[in-house]
Image: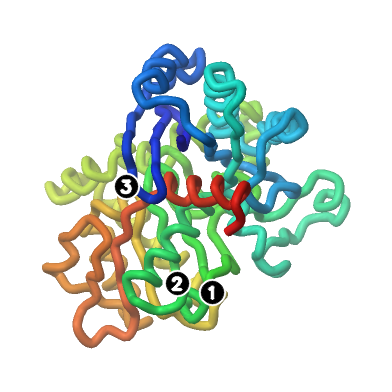
Amino acid sequence: MVVNAGSSSMKVSLLDGDVLEEHAELAVGPAGAGAGRLDELISDWGRPDVVGHRIVHGGRRFTGPVRIDADVEQQLRALTDLAPLHQPRSIAALDAVTTLLPDVPAVASFDTAFHASMPAESSTYAVPTDWRDKYGIRRYGFHGLSHAFCSERVAQLLDRPVTELRIVSCHLGAGASLAAVLNGRSVDTTMGFTPLEGLVMATRCGSVDPGLVLWLQEHERLSPREIATALEERSGLLALAGTADMREVESAAEQGDPDSVLALDVYVHRLVAGVAAMCAAMGGIDAIAFTGGVGEHSPIVRARAAVRLGFLGIMVDAEANEATSDTNVTAEGARVSTLVVTAREDLQIAREARAVFTGP
């Protein structure tokens, strides 16, 4: 059983091998993970052999999947301050499932783990040494489970070894990030110390000048909590266009709404700049893949990005680009393959959970 807790819902899946047997999405309220509905699912589905949990932040210690015991659980709770928007939801889901299945082994899979392979030049901030040593300040990266699955799926679709490919994986959803995957390993990404850095997102600002935060604290007397809430929950597409839903932004932009036009322009500008940076980290690109809610379901974003990235040899076929799942949408004559990949974090988590007990 795979448990993927988000900010407003908890996705629960039951897999046998790579076959999805059951799936449900539960609403998550302020009180926690909706244990009553979860109890019903477990009663209907039966007792699983192992539970795999998606945990957003693994800190410096957790660089791969790990079986959850009391010590691991304590350390996961201690990492909450690094991902205050996401980690509490993961912990709440873990608590709910453990209460219902206390004797079933559980495995934690981390969104940060895939990026643990990043070289020092990609993971290091130019901040005082004592900050890096004492507080663990570094670029961790996130969405690693999605990027790991996506890069492997690209290799399958192209029928080439992932160890021979330079892939830019674009996870574009409510949260959004890019990863430079060189020969199957992450060598750079757009998110950093927290899931706030990088691209424009649904309600998150992405990268801003840190001096902006200092100015707001000093001159406007805004508290850290006020600033954090604004940057995490009232920024991004929501701040620019009045809606966090890319479908609504695109529709309004087509009607000429100036705020939505600007929002889409800013979103694509940050996206293509990030893709170019990922290419620089790998010394080139063989394939670009779009995954996540926006990545899979927005032909407009993919097409506009491809036009801006044409200088890299990226071109999409207009008809094929209307697809939404596991499709090669590369235009004839393009030097770089462009693919749409269905996000399957559940498969990645299940595979990692099995590997903890049986080996890769």
Q: Is residue 241 above or below residue 269?
A: above
Going by the numbered disc 2, the residue's amino acid type is Ile
Looking at the picture, how far across and down is residue 336, in whole percent? 34, 80
Whether tag 2 and tag 1 are in contact, CB under 8 A, the answer is: yes
Mark 2 highlights which residue? 167
- Quadrant in which the C terminus is drawn: bottom right
Mark positioned earlier in the residue sequence (3 or 1): 1
Name the secondary structure under disc 2: strand
Q: Who's the residue at 41% across and 32% down the image?
A: 12
For mark 3, does the 10 Å Cα neighbourhood hold few (<14), some (14 to 19), or many (20 or more) residues? some
**Viewed as shown, does residue 83 lie left or right of 304?**
right
Looking at the picture, how far across and down is residue 158, in whole percent? 33, 75
Question: Of 288 and 159, which appears nearest the observer?
Answer: 159
Q: Is residue 261 above or below residue 231?
A: below
Q: CA distance from mark 3 to mark 1?
A: 24 Å
Mark 1 highlights which residue? 182
